[in-house]
Amino acid sequence: MRVAAWLGRRIGLLLLTMLAVSFLVHLALEVNVDAVAVKVLGQFSTPDQRAAWLRENGYDAPFLLRYLRWLGHFASGDWGRSTYYQEDIVKLILPRLAASALLAGAALLVMVPLSLALGIASGVRAGSLTDRGVSLFAILTTSVPDFAMAAFLTAIFVLGLGWLPGVSTMAGGFSLRELVLPVMVLVLASTGYLARMTRASMIEVMGQPYIRTALLKGASPSRIVFRHALRNALLTPVTVIMLQIPWILSGVIIVEVFFAYRGFGTLLYQAALNSDVYLVEACAMISVVAVVASQLLADIAYAALDPRLRGK
Amino acid sequence: MKRPPALVIGVAIVALWLLVAVFAPVIAPHDPLVSFKPLLRPGAAAFPLGTDLLGRDILSRLIWGARPVIFLSLAATLIAYIIGVGAGLLAGYRRGVLDAGFSFIANVILSFPVLVLYLVVIVALGPSYLNVVIAVTFGSAPAVFRIVRAIAIDIAGRDYIAAAVTQGEPTWRILLIEILPNAAPALAVDFCLRLGYSAIIIGSLGFLGLGLPPPAPDWGGMVTDGRALAFAFPHLVIFPCIAISSLVLALSLIADGLREARQ
Amino acid sequence: MTPILSIRNLTVALPKGGDRAFAVEDVSLDLHRGEILCVVGASGSGKSILSAAVMGALPGRLAIAGGEIRLGETLLTGLPDAALRRIRGNRIAMIPQEPIAALNPAMTVSRQIEEVFELHSDLARPVRRARARDLLEAMHLPDIDRVAASYPHQLSGGQCQRIAIAMGLAMHPDVLIADEPTTALDATTQAQILKLIRELKATGEHGVLFITHDFGVVRDIADRIAVMEAGRIVEVGEAARVLAAPQHPYTRALLAAVPRLEARAVRPAAEAVLTAKGLTKSYGAKLALDGVDISLERGTTLAIVGESGSGKSTLARLLVRIAEPTGGSIDVGGANFLASRGSALRRSRRQIQMIFQDPFGALNPRRTAGDIIARAATLGGIHRAEAKARALELLALVGLPADAYDRRPAAFSGGQRQRIGIARALAMAPQILICDESVSALDVLVQAQVLELLADLQARLGIAILFITHDLRTAGAIADRIAVMQHGRIVEQGDAPAILSTPAHDYTRALVAAIPGLSATERALGPSIRPALPPLPR
Amino acid sequence: MKQRRHVGALASLDGGPLHADVAGLAASLAAGRLDRRSFLRHAAWLGTAIPLGACGKVAPPSNDTLRFVCAIQQIGDPALSAWVEASNLFRNSLEFLTEVDAENIVRPGLAESWRPSDDLKTWVFTLRPGVRWSNGDALEVADIAYNFRRWLAPASKSVNRTAFAAIERFEALDDRRFALHLSRPVCSLAEQLYSATCPILHRDFDRLGGNWPANPIGTGPFRLTRFEVGREARFERREDYWGPAPRLKYIDYIDLGPDVSTHVAALAAGQVDVLYRITIAELDLVRSLPQARLLQHKAAWTLCIRMKVDTKPFDDIRVRRAVQLAADNAQMLQLAYRGMGEVADDHHVAPFQPDFGALPRQGRDVAKARALLAEAGHPDGIDLELTLGNTIGRWEQDTAQILQQNLADAGIRVSLKVLPPTEYWSVWNKVPFGLTSWAHRPLGIMTLDLAYRSGSTWNESGFADPAFDALLDRAMAIVDPHERAPVMAELEARLRDAAVMVQPYWPEKFTAVSPRVRGHELHPSDYFRMDKVWLA
């Protein structure tokens, strides 16, 4: 019951956030009615054309009413039509989302074990050579912007060594080889940060009295790390991984644009470039859902891992 | 206080870039907007880092390019800090409805993936210097708010704050004199990281073609401009990449050094 | 009889740059089966390092620089880690200081006990579980099945300490090392744990190395006493002898600092400067304070005594208006304190000041001592130009040198910081001082000094003191009147001598009985327990 | 002697006598005033059959799929199409009355022959027999009539309305023949019928919704089976095609976004076979890649940095002249296009176009530009905003940046407004100061007619000059390019003196294909016929 109430409250908050987000996005993109018309009709369209277009599309109604109307449509699954792609947005977005989920999922699949392993290895022995190495790796990789990383890797692996394909359009269906570079960029961009988080968490946990208790019980170092420290040390990274999702999503946009990967990121980018207002709105809403849902998942994961929070 | 080497190196690099940015007109050997001879490789005496496709001196463009990157990220970060620190201190100390309201707004903004937020802001406002600053500020302020709020909540529970209350200290003094200085070390770390992060974002916007309009020498834009030629003329991409990475790296080093020095 | 544990000339080096070269220097001790050896000393005297050395688990940067430790026939010093691991938790076990923190939050307590068998025996899993359950039973824990399946956070500190002891006893160790095992516990719980340890000793199976700073506890359980100062043993001997006729001046000072359980002469009643009526505070559904009435008279001391969670700190915070009560009234100097706002409130606040428990958290680390005190003086109505002079005066009053003015809190010891806190409070020239556990975080010797300072100030300035403490002995030493709190209510209040000698309420009686070292006679306290440990798994 | 023999061997497409003007052309050829290629091109205009060159080895039809990187734009009504890229898609399914090969020689398309009258004002076309639409209908004169009707209707938004403004009447002669009656002579009519906007649509096109990708009926060798704007399009071989079977089974058009370096990377990785075009920026990269073959040719395509003559401040010719005089065309070519092309002279006719009329070059004169500006009331210089969209590559932006430097010398401060490519095309003929890329046209006169005739749909500068229009009409009636040249020179001079644009240079054109690709000929207009392409 308590869990249900907690979950209910969280989901309520999620919906409220979504509502606020939709209002903000709508406000940002559509409060200036004339600008909407200009974006759709081109900035050198005549005032008459704009007025006619606005009338036809119900823009003579007050902002709040338009917002509610849009919200109603959105909630009922009618997300409008993309002005750029000339297609129903729902139909347009779903395969793109799947493609991006694949990319982000693959990146997480590599990134999570790698960063946890690095973080643990360096956190167990703070100050060791491994630790310094990992720290250096982390600080270097997190300092290189995604696009620069992508450029470097392309130069090396595509143009230099010729090992990997330089674009990831998946034109001929799914291709693992095409996934390698985008995933590599995402992994390199985030692993360092996650590893550092894991390391900090590990160091903190290794200083806890119960680790000493385990030591004094006669437990071996490996047992101390894996049985006693790990689960407690994972609390922070797991949350951080979930909270990394918005960050990864941002990286996904850059990487998708760079490698022409046909995912959600390029869709949003094209929509933004071409002022496809409805599509931008839909994409923004979806990315916010992804973020908020990941936060919810983070909470759930945290509760699942930490018995202290269970049943409270 | 012992100075960690990371801090020293970081400060040195950042100071160097700051000097470069401030004294760009004096240092830059050429006008960054004037074409000379195209695609010279690095090494020529007049153009030590070579020239770009349009024959502009890369060194001068890097030097001038330090300005927008540093000043825009600095401006954006500072404004974000003013907003975030003010709201965070108040919310964390006062709690209650104010806190709930601020926190909700921060949550809403933070539920946008950063780049999505910037795209929406830039789409709504169009790309320009000012709008880049607005976009980055808009994204950073809630994050700063969250950090400051957490610190303020923590410090507000300390006994010395209770002592100040029992002495009848006015709220603004409690916020600015009792709480803020204690949050400063953590904020200094975050400030450096955020500054670097803003630089990355400004570069990324440039990469996406949403940054500064040409022909402004902007590091991200230089990378994009040179990308197609990078295979034959790697210097077009490598130098701006090194510039932005070194700046961000230096800021991370400072953050790291500060963190280390604090422990 | 050969000792079960023998320490010879043990020296543990500190890393360079410390305040001394050795954490433990040339220490020699013997421990026999069926004996409790108390190692007593102030914090930083090296007693915890000593116990860590015995366990072969010194913190990373420390190393044994000389001497040897022998467990029966086994030479522990120089033993490889794998061999030490077979001894730790098996032949030597540790009872930790903070029981809740010492248990893994992500494991059920049963699993944590079973792990000892897993490490040191070949018992099958169901057997291990049964053994763990037996151990819990032997520790007289209620509702064994629930407890066994619980996570540490679901249990109380006392329960966790019993579990930690059960874990230590699982393999019937030769030596039990108890490192301040009761410091973090309430008085009544402490009494129960001490009793348990005494009974363990009585089995004659184990030798107990008991580390503490509290002579009350020592008096209760020690067979022999070793006094440590700055890494050295300054005195060792039979408990009775050391307690009755301490040889070393340091031992004598320590003993003298323990407040005797006797009330001071009660000062005559005066007019009330602080009156609270029906004070109530609730946090949501939880009632932290439930209709508390108190009255504090000019120039006198009222002690509020209670265990953690009794609501005494909440009371303190309400009285100085750091928190607002849900109901009730507070009168300060005849004015309704709760009703005042703005500048009136600021004026009223000057009359009632607080001294906090934690000397480390009560001073803003970024400001100098002088700045802190001078600012308080300014707020107290003194002109800014004279504030510095006043601050220097106050520093002298609390016994700090003038050069303390420009130093930040980090440069001071706990006792000195507490003095700065007192000076800060006095800078506002209050009529009332609220002391919330103001000495409990200090070492015994320092505790005595600070209490003395407070009494002295009271005598000179005529301040009324509300003294909040968990320690009846301290209350007795300082208070004219005592109020006993439990579950957010005052269960009994009256003149200090009466409360201490003839407690009327059951809870007060239990508190009095739980005072360690009160007498050697057994007190009727819970069921008599005789640990019936499960057999050795060999 | 040799030439004469050739002329003697020529025949007309319909088997009738050669057009009267062919003799005149032959005389010019004999006199050396005309080269052989020019002669053949012009003879072809007049309905002369030109023998095909020797054909190389031709592969049999296979099941191969060719992957072609190309922007996939909205098509809708092909007659309205402004994009050559889009036309390259529908050219696989839709055919034209005539075809112009890579040598710029007009050849029969859906019309197997045509015969202009001696005054070039009446043209009779004969349709090829046995052509069937992909829906099974036979190609009829009614189809052609339908197309001309919709092109020329008063409400037509098609650029064809301007291009064929001379056509007064369409006349169906019998079930295979029709005649076009012109108000004035147009010698290049047959060649113009291969413009990107002239595909022959099925007579029911409008009745079926007027959206070609939704109902992709065509007579061509391939059938559209998938079409997603901004993503991909697929064409499949029509086994019932009337002509020689195409070698490829499928052609996949893939939109990889505007970034050409991404395209090159895809080619390098073997993910695609043909790139639509590469820009100057990728040249070195492609040369270094073993997985890529560079194709290179000269074409009359260019950038026009044009000013709208009816918008402030460009309504003042002194401002426009100042801009033109301050521009350094040679430097723009040198820096923005790395010298790979020819300097142009601000009149949009290339020296290598056959009808070029030689004109003394106009030099750069910054002092004069300044003086003109001051005279126009801008003694302290002037601030302008140049809008561009990088529609064919970032070198548009690069060129604009050099122009920006050039103009700064004369006190003209230009700020650049870079729009996304698609967004630029929605404003290209509206912005006061814009940089537009213009595709190749075989003849200079075609470009002038399209872009600078008063009121023409594509007249982005708003230039209007009746005298210019009259000269255009005159030039179009002259078949012999040698005789046309002086008129052209006059046109060019008028246009340049009106200072409607800076037209800096004629860039060379590049693309890259996989070494496996055979038979892919670069067409100067970028009009690709894919049915002769195969993979080795």
Image (cartoon, rainbow, N blue to C red):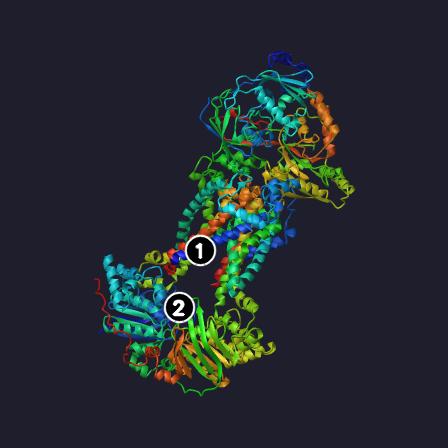
Mark 1, Cα crowd under 10 Å, few <14 / some 14-19 / many 20+, is some
State which quadrant residue C107 falls in.
bottom left
Whether residue B153 sits left or right of residue D495 in the image: it is: left
Q: Position of residue A215 (x, y in %)?
A: 33, 62
Q: Residue furthest right?
A: D375
Question: Please, is residue C100 above or below residue D439 in the view?
Answer: below
Q: Which is more toward the observer, C19 or B164?
A: B164
Mark 2 residue type: Leu
The residue where tag 2 is placed is C14
Question: Please, is residue B232 above or below residue C134 in the view?
Answer: above
Q: Chain of mark 1?
A: A
Q: Position of residue C426 (x, y in %)?
A: 51, 79
Mark 1 residue type: Arg
Mark 2, Cα crowd under 10 Å, few <14 / some 14-19 / many 20+, is some
Whether residue C502 sits left or right of residue D208 in the image: it is: left
Question: Please, is residue B157 above or below residue D84 in the view?
Answer: below
Q: Position of residue D487 (x, y in %)?
A: 73, 24
Q: Position of residue A303 (x, y in %)?
A: 39, 57
The residue where tag 1 is placed is A10
The numbered mark at residue D20 is none
Asked whether residue C36 appears in the rendered view, the answer is yes
Q: Which is more toward the observer, C300 or D141?
A: D141
